[in-house]
Amino acid sequence: MANLKIREKLTLKPVDKDHLEQFNKLLRYVFQVTSKDLLDSGYEDGELIRSKLPMLERADVFGWFNEDNLVSQICIYPCTVNIHGRIYDMGGITGVGTYPEYAGIGLMNDLVRVALGAMREKGQWISYLYPYSVPFYRHKGWEIMSDVLSYTIPDTRLPKQVDVPGYVERVGVDHPDVLETYDHFARRTHGALIRGEDDWEEYWRWENEDERTAAVYYNEDRVPTGFVIYRVEEDIFHIKEMIYLDMESRRGLWNFISAHFSMIDEVQGKIYKNEPLAFFLDDSEITETITPYYMARIVDVKAFLERFPFAGVKAPFHFIVSDPAAEWNNGIFCIAGSENGRNVISSEPQGPSVKLTIQTLSSLLMNYRSASYFADLERIEADAETIKMLESVIPNQEPYFSDYF
């Protein structure tokens, strides 16, 4: 009864730039961002609030208000991602939070439903988010879609120098060759964010600009084909991200890192897909830790499947999907053929069936895990032949996502 009385006082409506200070205040409270954290990241007093203004102007933000006071919010950041070679608009969920005195009365459940409807209206057929609670977002329809591998390499186990025809130059992190190389990489890499100017700003949100350094590898034709973004601090070479378009640039970048041998005790870094780094080292005795990273959710199954690049579908089959938060995704979705480069999706069942939740469908089509893996976990209901068929028609590319919003 008390909960109902609280809800009766609240109004759900869009959050706009006039609420910027309240938006920021709620974020700082929920995520426990202190003034020291801001100063350590290079922000002056009030600068973080101003830096969030472009995001608030670009994004769709919805919140619950108690009169004029913002008490719960969700932000949909407009993004573009590569899904198996197809470019999709993506809704990046961020800025999620509720003051504790308003928790437990279903406010976020309503905000998620409103956010899904808004993404659907804008043609954002898929959504990514970084989960503060994997179980919470699983309950809302998201599922893990990528991992981050953290590694530590002692200086004595760094790769030996190898001959490469190109060379490395240190440049500013906003150098055109860095941006161009990443764009080439993202447009050929499944799962990756296509970064515009605002996305790069968000990429650097919690980095102190005085610590930013980039090293670009150029091949013998002076074409940039890889880069590493890093900092050296307290005898540790910290790799934020390493991008390479071929093995030559990979070797060249590791030559550059190993050249710091006399300056450092170890290298620490992250890889944003399940790449066996130790396998490529002469001495594989290093420390690696794999952790789930981002989650994904299909917003509109029919629209997503129409553009999905299935490989070699020979006969119709259909998904039977259940979705706890988006009723338009509950039902039958049959891949019934193709016309003009798009899949024909029908609500009439044809061929073998694949019964699964929106969470499993999302992770499956992102190819985070295989159909047989999900079948073994009893998260897919289908016969053995259908499982084999799924593994043959879903592109076999591991998702990569290195951003954070």
Image (cartoon, rainbow, N blue to C red):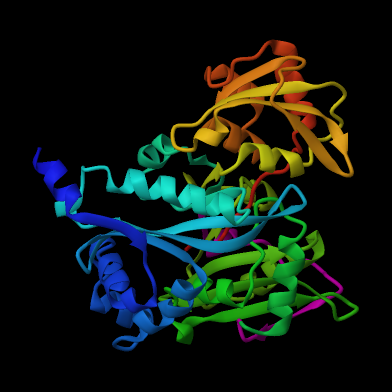
Q: Quadrant of residue 134?
A: top left
Residue at 84% over, 77% down: 223
Q: Position of residue 174 (x, y in %)?
A: 62, 83
Q: Is residue 337 magenta?
A: no
In this view, 69 is above or below 275: below
Indicate yes or no whether the magenta region holds residue 163: yes
Residue 170 higher or lower than 13, as above or below? below
Q: Is residue 66 left or right of residue 137?
A: left
Residue 374 lies in quadrant = top right
Say if 388 sits above or below 20 in the image: above
* Residue at 65 percent of width and 14 percent of height: 382
Q: Which of 288/358 is in front?
A: 358
Q: Which residues are magenta?
A: 150-173
Q: Position of residue 37 (x, y in %)?
A: 30, 75
Nearest the viewer among 90 and 312 is 90
In the image: residue 75, left or right of residue 334: left
Is 331 located above or below residue 180 in the figure?
Answer: above
Q: Position of residue 361 (x, y in %)?
A: 60, 32
Let me know if residue 287 appears in the view: no
Please identify the quarter of the rendering in which residue 171 is found. bottom right
Q: Quadrant of the N terminus?
A: top left
